Image (cartoon, rainbow, N blue to C red):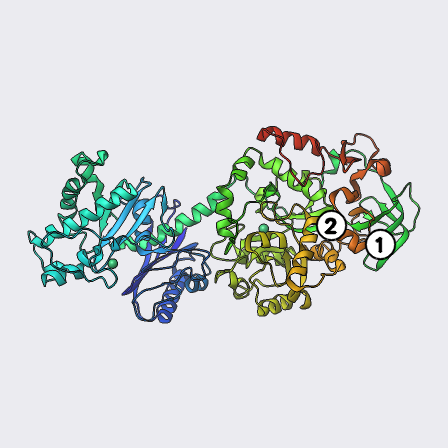
Amino acid sequence: MIVAAIEAGGTKFVLGLAKSDDGGRALPDLIFRESIPTTTPDETIRRAADTLLEASARHGKPDALGIGCFGPVELRTGHADWGCVTSTPKPGWRGAAVAGPIGRALGLAAAFDTDVNAAAAGEGRWGAGRGLTDFVYITVGTGIGGGVMSGGRLVHGAAHPELGHFKPAKVEGDSYEGFCPYHRACLEGLASGPAIAARWGRSAQELPAGHPAWEMEAIYLARAFAAFACVLSPQRLILGGGVGLRPGLAERVCEILGAELNGYLGWLDDEEARKAFVVRPELGANAGLYGAVALAMWRTESERGRYRENFIFRRLLPKIVGGRDESTKGENVDAFALTGATIVTPRGIKTSSSLVVEGERFAGFARPSAINVAIGPAIVYPGLVNVHDHLRGNYTPRVGPAPGTFYVNWGPWDADLKASDVYAERANITVEQMYFLGAWKNLFSGVTTVNDHFPHQFNEPFIDRLPIRVIREYCLAHECSSFDLKWGDGMEIEHRWAVERDWPFITHLEEGFDAESQDGIGILERAGCLTDHDILVHCIGFSEEDIRKVKKAGATVAWCPASNIFMFNTTCKIRKLLRADVNVALGTDSTHTGSINLLEEIRCGRDAYRQLYGEDLPAKTLFDMVTINGAKAFRIAKETGSIESGKLADIAVFRAQRDDPFENLVEAKMEDLELLVHRGTPLLGLESRYAELFAGENRPVTRIAIGGRDYLVLGNPAALYRSVRKAIGFEKKLEYLPFEP
Ligand SMILES: [Zn+2]
Ligand SMILES: [Zn+2]
């Protein structure tokens, strides 16, 4: 791989390209290196980007980008100023954006950190911190700064460590008051190069060995290091920088450190151990660049690693939609008609009609059939379409922000989820079980088509066996921003494939409030990826201009109000989207943040709309959002999404409780679902009415009770439920399964 690296300093930016053939195990080769002076932010950043673009034209396009930057900087990925220099005294640079503009120019997500954290990353990977989980890198030169590796991670915390501004006890007889404009006599104020020069009237380079300046310098550093040793418990301290590298200094610091600690830290009692405790960096003149390379590699690995699976995705090109493996399901009824029915069709509501199914498809509204079933007081809808779910994430209860707080983007949610008890409990269940739970969740809410927004290699092993249609033909990104999870092969490539294959391109977008989240449409637009193939999920950061662009492009917005409100206390500008006539489809997201199922999501959407605007979202609009709009978004509206002759027979029959069929659907609960048919095959049906449709040889039909009524079901969700309970060791209630096993 090739990595673009930037050591962004206050006087110069060092730019480089590094090449590694072994995934960065050995120190990569620097195949390009150039310095440019740091002038104004605009000029410097443009030159940095141009220089790297030119270099990549000659040496190869980089796969990743790392930036170690002079500070202070904003490192919170969710923050509006992420990637910016913050409160620097350097003229013009306060608030200057670094990572965002360079990343966009190169088309890469930047790994961004302080210069000293970058140096620590480099030393940790290839230098003096190799193999250690906890160490401190400290540079003593024109300033003093430190990067901290703790438990194998670079410490950021609320911002990032500022080791140079620790205040050591003054050395007796030192009358110099210190020069730090904030603290005067902090470590930087007393022991950096300028402090030495101010105190002794000569620069550090000019002071000979044996000069009392060096003893004083060693004492200050030793006092600081003793504090770092006590507070951070590092395995090693790496001392670099123009002053820090002075011959003999590290050794003298070690000796004094022993006296300072006075035998308290037992593991440093031994002189040899102490000598190995304070060491010099090993990466030399290119340490800053290598640090930036390490940041980029580290980020790429941790993000890919989080979701790495052994399965290698077979790039299949079958046309139309996964679905059940018919060969294992025995003989299906060839043809049947639902009679005396109220049917919701694109041309209006048909009453007292017959709906005829032949094979996999609808065959009109009148012809008599071999099997005729009177549906009674119920209404026939097309099978519902859930535009956005993560099938293996459907576990309960939800995991969210602390009470009274909300997230700025998905990042902290992911961290909270992974740290939660629920997630640990879920880990007892296999991925296969999770996929089946997710599919049944959808099935019991009348859904016959759903997308699993995960990379293909996750769901490909299961799609053919799941009871409902899980969209197989899609391209994706996780989220078009620099902190996404690198699903798929990158936004541009995935989008191009989507267009070539006439598939949807699905991505989370603008799920948050930080600057980058708010620029999602800009990112897509600049990459040429904003088109009618797009399904843009969440979009809560959309501006009115964004909405106009989405409408013009013909993209779909996947609206997940329950998840949005739970995580962010708001949702997208839904009324403006609808007034702009954008195609909006409703999605549940997973039950880790969203509602229990699509039926609940419909009600959540209506409630949210009423709360936001004080008016009702029409039930017909909601119906479109869970049927034809989703089918259009998936580019399969010719096959499903409405009841029309020739389309696949995807049917959801709900008990009639309201005269208006759309209002009836808005109020429908799981126990109101009386029949579900996918591609002509009945999957779930009230036994008292639809038993005939489940007859036939060798059919794996089981019986469950929902809302006090017996149902026949193709497959065995009760066995799944039991196996899940067994795996986790107690009688877990999964609210989307409307029965007791
Ligand atoms: Zn200070
Ligand atoms: Zn999602």
Assess disc 1: are there few (<14), some (14-19) or many (≥20) residues with their C-alpha within 10 Å of its C-alpha. few
- Above-or-below relation of 542 to 460: below
Quickly name the residue at label 1. Answer: 659
Q: Amino acid at mark 1?
A: Asp
Residue 397 is marked as none
Picture quarter with the C terminus: top right
Of residues 327 and 591, the one nearer the viewer is 591
**What is the count of numbered marks?**
2
Q: Tell me where residue 416 appears, x and y as whole percent.
A: 49, 45
At numbered mark 1, what does the secondary structure look like: helix, strand or loop?
A: loop
Quickly name the residue at label 2. Answer: 384
At numbered mark 2, what does the secondary structure look like: helix, strand or loop?
A: strand
Residue at horizontal 66%, vertical 40%?
735
Q: Is residue 207 left or right of residue 439?
A: left
> Which quadrant would residue 62 be assigned to in this image?
bottom left
Q: Tell me where residue 528 appears, x and y as whole percent.
A: 55, 64
Q: Do the residues bearing badges 1 and 2 touch, measured as CB atoms within 8 Å? A: no
Q: CA distance from mark 1 to mark 2?
A: 20 Å
Of residues 426 and 607, the one nearer the viewer is 607
Q: Is residue 430 left or right of residue 305?
A: right
Assess disc 2: are there few (<14), some (14-19) or many (≥20) residues with their C-alpha within 10 Å of its C-alpha. many
